[in-house]
Image (spheres, helix red, strand yellow):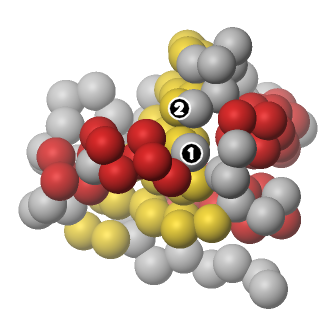
Amino acid sequence: MSNRDLNYLNLIAQAIFDKKGYNILALDVRGLSSITDYVVIAEGSVDRHVMALARCIEEELRKRDLKPLYREGGKVGDWVVLDYGFVMVHLFQPGVREKYCLEELWQEAKIVDLSIQV
């Protein structure tokens, strides 16, 4: 994993944490997925919280000239996906995360050790 990738993953995780998102998980899916290298999964408590997490991530990455290639789910807020090409961010309400259990899709993925400042 490159330092650049790890820095972006940490930036995303920190943005989630700072907005009170929780259960943050980053997976290295290189070699397991044909559409991305990394997946970040996290939760927000309600729809507005999930949407606020997505906005915060977009704002932080936009400061570094990164814009999502695709954004889905912003109207309902139970599951928002931000696709940045090399990383896909999935933000869920807890029940929706449990229902779809994306972690199960990438059981063989390596968990990325994130550095979140508390």
Out of 7 and 90, give the one closest to the viewer. 90
The residue to which callout 1 is attached is 93
- Asked if 14 appears above or below 53 in the picture, the reply is below
Give coordinates of residue 61: x percent, y percent: 76, 39
The residue to which callout 2 is attached is 79
**Residue at coordinates 79% horizontally, 35% vertically from top-left?**
48
Q: Is residue 41 visible?
A: yes
Q: Is residue 40 visible?
A: no
> Residue type at mark 1?
Gln
Looking at the image, tell me whether mark 1 or mark 2 is earlier in sequence order.
2
Which image quadrant: the C terminus?
A: bottom right
Out of 78 and 104, give the one closest to the viewer. 78
CA gap, disc 1 and disc 2: 7 Å
Which image quarter: residue 36? top left
**Residue at coordinates 19% horizontally, 37% vertically from top-left?**
33
For label 1, the SS is loop
- Asked if 94 appears above or below 80 in the picture, the reply is below
Give coordinates of residue 22: x percent, y percent: 63, 66
Give coordinates of residue 12: x percent, y percent: 67, 54
Which image quadrant: the N terminus?
A: bottom left
Q: Are marks 1 and 2 in contact (CB under 8 Å)?
A: yes
On the rendered structure, is 60 left or right of 66? right
Q: Of all residues shown, which one is farthest toward the bottom?
A: 118
Out of 42 and 76, give the one closest to the viewer. 76
> Residue type at mark 2?
Trp
**Residue at coordinates 66% horizontally, 51% vertically from top-left?**
44
On the rendered structure, is 34 left or right of 55? left
